[in-house]
Amino acid sequence: MDRRSLLATPLALAACSRLPSVRTPGPEAAPLKSLAPFPIGATGMTGQLSDPVWVARMREHVSQLTPEWELKPERILQPDFTYDFSASDRIVDWGREQGLRVHGHTLVWYSQGQQAFTDDLPGTRFAAEYDRYVSTVASRYRGKMAGWDVVNEPVAEDGDGLRDCHFSRALGQEGYIVRAFEQARAADPEAVLFLNEYNLENIPRKGATFLRLVERLLTLGAPIGGIGTQSHLDIEIPAGQITSFMKDAGSLGLPIHVSELDFSMRSDNRLDTRSLAARRAQQVARVGELAEAFMALPERQRYAFTTWGLRDTDSWLLRPDGKGWTDDSPLLLDAGGRANPAYAAVANAFRRR
């Protein structure tokens, strides 16, 4: 997940500043991991490990950990092609000590790595260092990861083809992806290897382009083992759109990871005068639809269901180092670890099995 273009228009910001409080305490929440026969995940960072309340909530609710930042190239890769694993080792070791399954995020991402992989780096050196980076990181955690997001966000913002980036310019738009999957498979042969992307449910054109890309890469021999849909849901999308994408994705037969779920109530598109109750109802409906669509997949295709943060205050949308929004409620648990309204929708979907 990046700091992508979710900035509101001035009118929308004005509306959001008047958003009524979203922090009315909800009911007690049964452990999320008790609701489902597949892993329930959340992200974590090393800075949270010293927070005993966060630690207790993670132990209570989740069975899978995704390091939010520590495994990203901007943290590991240094400008001189040396590596710093101090933070990634700490968060991975912590997760395993808690008995959590760990999911690796991410080996290759178009928005990172430019400090070392510059456009003027000679082609042979670029390719060699690229292979070395993917192989070194994946092999360091060989046998410790259930899966890896090998390549993150390869599709253009609007779904019109693939992204141009420093990796694609040096190795080809498909070539850098295939190469990364080959290196990851050799380095960590037991991990499930994912292609991960956002806005797949929100923008049907992008979802279709992504699935065509998966099919194309498989024909090229890329050892793709799973589909990651980030599911940063736009609660204003039409009913049925999430279900349609999930059916199309499921038809490829690969495991699917709802990998970065959140569901902001803020609107970027217009002056929104709806009541908090109306926004909540729309939010609950879209999250419930996602959970139902995930449950409709064959059991073997349900890799995990992961939220990007555990409680509202853990979300990148609310944190001062993220968007810094104050009046939003984008996760299943509130700041106190109690159930937000969307929690019941997810719980009801998971219990119907």
Image (spheres, grey):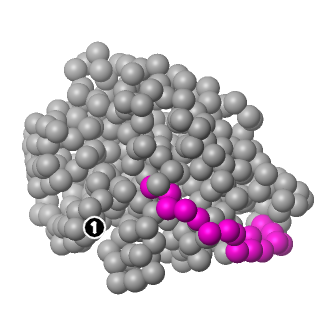
At 63% from the left edge and 46% from the top edge, which residue is drawn? 348
Q: Is residue 193 magenta?
A: no
Rendered view: 217 above or below 309: above
- Would residue 237 be found to the left or right of residue 103 on screen? right
Three-letter code for the amino acid on which mark 1 is drawn: Gln
Snapshot quadrant of residue 29 = bottom right
- Would residue 330 be found to the left or right of residue 70 on screen? right
Q: Could you classify mark 1 by the number of other residues whose Cα lies within 10 Å: few (under 14), some (14-19), or many (20 or more)?
A: some
At 84% from the left edge and 59% from the top edge, which residue is drawn? 277
At 27% from the left edge and 44% from the top edge, which residue is drawn? 147
Q: Position of residue 155 (x, y in %)?
A: 45, 35
Q: Position of residue 107 (x, y in %)?
A: 26, 49
Span highlighted in magenta in the image: 16-33
Rendered view: 34 above or below 147: below
Front residue of this view, candidates 320 and 263: 263
Q: Helix or strand or loop: what does disc 1 sit on? A: loop
Front residue of this view, candidates 36 and 130: 36
Q: Is residue 233 visible?
A: no
